[in-house]
Amino acid sequence: MKLFLTVMAASMLIASPSIAAAPCKDAKTGKFVKCPPKAAAKPVRCKDAKGKFAKCGSPGAKPA
């Protein structure tokens, strides 16, 4: 039983990187292609003390 658990644990450690790396698949051709770059992060919006949107550089503005 211990040998079985040891083998299973070792196989999970070996197989986990291959499962985590998921290549992108083209919907039309069904072939694997290079994944597009991730989308840029949304710009940070800030609010002032009254709760209205303000420029982030203004005094009292905090990220919303």
Image (cartoon, rainbow, N blue to C red):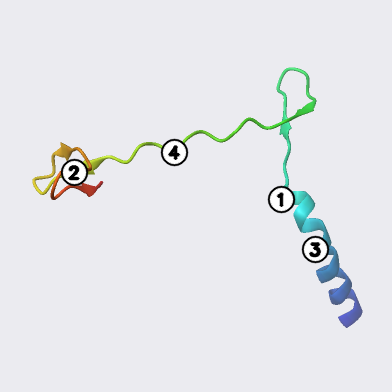
Q: Give the SS element for disc 4.
A: loop
Q: Is residue 1 visible?
A: no
- Mark 1 / mark 4, whichever is N-terminal: 1
- Mark 1 / mark 2, whichever is N-terminal: 1
* Residue lying at 79% horizontally and 50% vertically, measured from the top left: 18
- In the rendered view, does 14 fall on the left or right side of 41? right
Q: Distance of mark 3 from mark 4, alpha carbons?
A: 34 Å
Q: Nearer the viewer, residue 61 or 33?
A: 61
Please tell me how crowded label 1 is: few (under 14), some (14-19), or many (20+) other residues with Cα within 10 Å.
Answer: few
Q: Which mark is residue 54?
A: none
Q: Which mark is residue 20?
A: 1
Instruction: Report which residue position mark 4 lands on.
Output: 41
Q: Amino acid at mark 4?
A: Ala
Does 12 sit above or below residue 24? below
Q: Nearer the viewer, mark 1 or mark 3?
A: 1
Q: Nearer the viewer, residue 2 or 39?
A: 39
Q: Amino acid at mark 1?
A: Ala
Q: Nearer the viewer, mark 1 or mark 2?
A: 2
* Residue lying at 73% horizontally and 37% vertically, measured from the top left: 23
- Mark 1 / mark 3, whichever is N-terminal: 3
Q: Distance of mark 1 from mark 4, alpha carbons?
A: 23 Å
Q: Which mark is residue 47?
A: 2
Q: Nearer the viewer, mark 3 or mark 2?
A: 2
Q: Distance of mark 1 from mark 3, alpha carbons?
A: 12 Å
Q: Nearer the viewer, mark 1 or mark 4?
A: 4
Q: Are marks 1 and 3 in contact (CB under 8 Å)?
A: no
Q: Amino acid at mark 3?
A: Met
Quadrant for the N terminus, please.
bottom right
Q: Which mark is residue 12?
A: 3
